Image: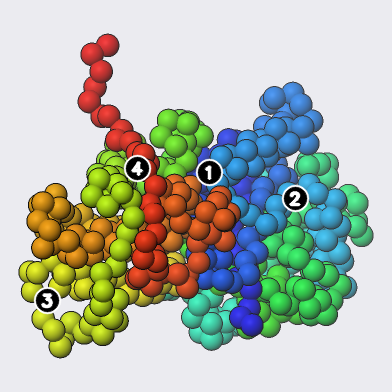
Amino acid sequence: MSKPFFITTAIDYTNGAPHIGHAYEKILADVLARYHRLRGEEVYFLTGVDQHGQKVQQSAEKHGIPPQEFVDGLTSKFSDLWAKLGIRYDGWATTTAPSHKHCVGQILTRLHQAGQLYKSKQGGHYSVRQEQFLTDKERNDQGEFGPEWGEVEFREEENYYFKLAEHRDWLLDLLDRRPDFVLPTFRRAELRHAVEKMTGDLCVSRPKSRLAWGIEFPFDPEFVTYVWFDALVNYLSFAPGFNPIAPEHSPQFTLRWPPLQIIGKDILIPAHGVYWPIMLKALGFDVDQMPSLLVHGWWNIAGSKMSKSLGNTVNPDALADRYGAEALRHYLISDISTGKDADFSEERLVMRYNTDLANCLGNLLNRTLSMSAKYRLGSVTAPHGLRESVANYSPEASPVTSSVLDQIIDRAFRMKTICHSYQTEMEHFAVAQALAYAHSIATLGNELVDLAAPWKLAKDPSQSATLDATLYHLADSLRVIAILISPVMPNAAHGIFDQLQWNLQTTQKESRFQWNEINWGGLPDGHTLGQPSPLFPRIDTTPSDS
Ligand code: MSP
C-alpha cells in the first residue's frame, strides 16, 4: 500500500478577515488533496488558524474584548469561508486548543531537558510590530530600521533561547541531501544563501509582563511561548497519533509523516526553512523525516503587495457571492503558476470564466446534449469497430486524414496523452497547467463539432455511423473532462455527470470520480444522456445604463 498523502497549509493569523491570498493557499491544497483522493490514495489534509501573539492581543484590546472572544469571532470567519469555498479538510488546527497548548508545553520541556533551550539576558532593539529583537542585519542602507519594523525600542530582557546556530551545517547538509525539502528550486537556493549567513539563536519566550496572550512555559510560568514557535508546532500537535514524548513510537503518526507543507514565499525564511527543520531535528527527526515545503507566490494588486494598511485587500467571500465559489476556484488555480506571483483582477476572473467555462466547456456540454437529444433521443452508440480502431491506433503508422472518423480516432488517442500530461503536471504541483490540459479536451471537442457539423450529418442517412461516433466521442470526452476538473470544480464536475446521467448512484459523493475511469470509451452503448441545462451561464460584462 502506498503511503497516505499528508498535506498541510500555513495556519492563518486571526487578527483580520481572510483575504484572497489565504483563500488561494487553501484552494491549492484542497485541489491537491482532491487529486490524490481521485487517484485512490488516502489523504489527510490539515489546516487551521494561528490565534496567539502580540498583534492579536493588541487588536483585542482595541476592540475592548478578551482575546479569546476576539479570535473566536475571526476563526469562524475563516472556517465559514472554507466551507463556502468547498475546502475539504480532515484536521482543523486552532492554537488555543488545550491539546495543542499541552503539546507545546511538552515539546518545550523536552527541548529544555535535552539542553536545546537555555535562559539568557540580552538587550537590543525590539520591533513591536514584528514582535522580535532586531540586529544590524535588519538596518536599511541608511543604517536605520525601516518602516516595515514599525515602532522600534531598546529592551533588555531575560528570555529562553532555542539553539539554532549549532545546527547550521546540518541544515546545509539537509538542503544538499533533500532537494525536495524546498520547492521550487529557486526558493531552495534563496534559503541556502540565508542559512550560510545565519548566526545567533532564536528567542522563544516572551515575559508575561508584556505579553499575556500565549502558551505558558510549563517549567517557568513567568513566560509565554513566542508565537512562531507555538504556531509551527501545530503541524505535529494536530497530526493524527503524534506523541510528543516519543513520536517514533506511534504507527498512526509515522504512517503519514512527513507532510507536504504549502506555505507562501514570505514565511519560508526563517520560520519554515530554518526554525522548523531545526525544531524537528532537536526532537529527534532525521533527514528523511523532514517535510517538503511547497512555496507558492503571492497574489498582488496591480503589482503591489496586498495589505490591510493599504486598504487594497480583496475579499474572497464577496467574490464567491458574486460569481460563485467555483468560478473563484477556477480563476485562482488557472491564472497563477505555482511558485510565481500573479496580479489579482476581477476582470480577468470574469474573462477566464466566460472564456474557459461558459464559451468552451459549457458550450460543449450544451451542444452535445442538445444534438444527442435532437438526433438520437439522447442515446449514445459507439459504431461497430470504433473501440478497436481507437485501441489499435498509432499516429505514426496512420497519418490522420480530414475524415471525421479519422479525426475522432486521433482525438480519442490524444486524450490518453493529455490525461498523462495532466497527471505529470499534478504530480509536480503545476495545477494551472494540469487544468489547462483538461480544458484542452473541451477545445478539441468544440473543434470536432465545427469539423463534423452534426447538423449536416443528420441529414444524410449514409453518415449515420459518423454522426453516432461524433456524438459518442463528445459525450465520452465530457465524462473524462468532468473527472479531470473535479479537483478544482467538484460541483461543476457533478453537474456534468448529472447531465450525462452518469454514476448516478454516487451523486454528490467525491467517490463518483475515479482516476481509473479516465480511459476513452467508458460510456456503454445505448447509454441515455440527460437534458441540457446551462452549467456556466455567461457573466454579462456590458455596463448597465443606470
Ligand atoms: N500565521 C502565520 C503562519 C503560521 S504557519 C505555522 C502566517 N499567517 S498569515 O495569515 O499571515 O498568512 C497565511 C498564509 O497566507 C501564508 O502562507 C502566507 O504566505 C499566505 N499569504 C498571505 N498573503 C498572501 C498573498 N497576497 N498571496 C498569496 N498568499 C499569501 O503567516
Mark 4: give few (<14), some (14-19) or many (20+) Cα within 10 Å: many
In this view, the residue in front, 35 or 470, is 470
Q: On the picture, is 138 further left or further right than 68?
A: left
Q: Secondary structure at mark 2?
A: loop
Give the vertical position of 107 relative to 174 (above or below). Answer: above
Q: Disc 4 to disc 1, how far (Cα)?
A: 26 Å
Nearer-the-camera pick, 80 or 171: 80
In primary-sequence order, the first of circles 4 and 3 is 3
Q: Quadrant of residue 349?
A: top left
- State yes or no: Cβ of the residue under disc 4 lies below 8 Å from any atom of ligand 1: no
Task: Classify residue 44 as left or right of residue 369.
Answer: right
Q: CA distance from mark 4 to mark 3?
A: 32 Å
N-terminal label among 2 and 1:
1
Task: Look at the picture and state if 321 lies above or below 82.
Answer: above
**SS label for mark 1:** loop
Residues at badges 1 and 3 in contact (C-beta under 8 Å)? no
Q: Residue at x 59, y 72 (%)?
A: 41
Please say if 543 is above or below 124: above
Position of the N terminus, as image quadrant, is bottom right
Residue annotated with mark 4: 532
Q: The residue under label 3 is which amino acid type?
A: Val
* Viewer-side residue, 16 vs 158: 16
Which residue lies at the image location 50% right of the left edge and 61% below the top edge? 513
Q: Nearer the viewer, residue 540 or 491?
A: 491
The residue identified by callout 3 is 400
Answer few, some or many: residues within 10 Å of disc 3's Cα (few below 14, many 20 plus, some between 14 and 19): some
Q: Could you say whether the residue bearing mark 4 is in a helix, strand or loop? A: loop
Is the CB of mark 2 within 8 Å of ligand 1? Answer: no
Residue 45: % across, % down: 63, 60
Q: Which residue is mark 2?
A: 95
Q: Is residue 419 left or right of 279 when viewed as pictured?
A: left
Distance from the alpha carbon under mark 1 to that under mark 3: 43 Å
